[in-house]
Image (cartoon, rainbow, N blue to C red):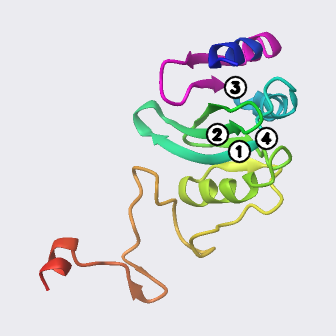
Amino acid sequence: METKDIYGRLEQQFPGKVADFKGDVQEPCCKVDAQAIVEVCRFLRDDPGLKFEVLSDLTGLDWPKEEKIQVVYHLYSYAQKHQMVLKVDLPRDNPKVATTEGVWKVANWFEREVYDLFGVIFEGHSDLRRIMLPEDWVGHPLRKDYVEQEEYDGISTQRAPLVEKLLR
């Protein structure tokens, strides 16, 4: 099935909740309304003609000028041999979206990483806590306005520039 056909099925199934299809790129994508992400994902997984049984990646992007955080879902179907990317825009000051771990179990780990590094709250998540940084770490390091603490737990976070390390 062509990606434009997949998008057409989504438009038909979820009128007004999917938009901005880009099919002439390496990974075809579209935007999904945040309130519809779980039902869109479940439809893409369960529809016999689509069968997106794999969430191969879930990540975030910080767009401070647009005042948004974007959550990006990379889907793949081994059965149908096609792929699709879904993008959900969230307000940067309060980024919240429903968890998709009920659709794909691997979302549990991906969502924890996005929570840890971007501060996105995945509502309904079974174990939303930091996965890479200590629980008492301040801030979310992949946000563009992130300022690293000068020290953590009495240990300096300052590092010599890479060039200095290479010249030693």
Q: Amino acid at mark 1?
A: Leu
Look at the image and tell me in which quarter the C terminus lies: bottom left
Reading the image, the residue beneath label 2 is 73
Numbered range of the magenta stretch:
10-32
Please give the name of the residue rendered at 46% of the width and 60% of the height, measured from the top-left corner.
141
Pointer 3 or 2: first along the chain: 3
Q: Are marks 3 and 2 in contact (CB under 8 Å)?
A: no
User: Are discs 3 and 4 less than 8 Å apart at CB?
Assistant: no
Relative placement, left or right, of 30 versus 123 is left
**What whole-number distance in Å separates the C-alpha atoms at marks 3 and 1?**
18 Å
Residue marked by disc 4: 53
Secondary structure category for the residue under label 3: loop
Q: Secondary structure at mark 2?
A: strand
* Residue density around tag 4, few if under 14, some if 14–19, many if 20 or more, within 10 Å: some
Where, by quadrant of the figure, is residue 37 drawn? Answer: top right
In three-dimensional space, the C-alpha distance between marks 2 and 4, rounded to whole angstroms, equals: 13 Å
Tell me which residue sits at (55%, 53%) in the image: 118
Marks 3/2: CA–CA distance: 13 Å
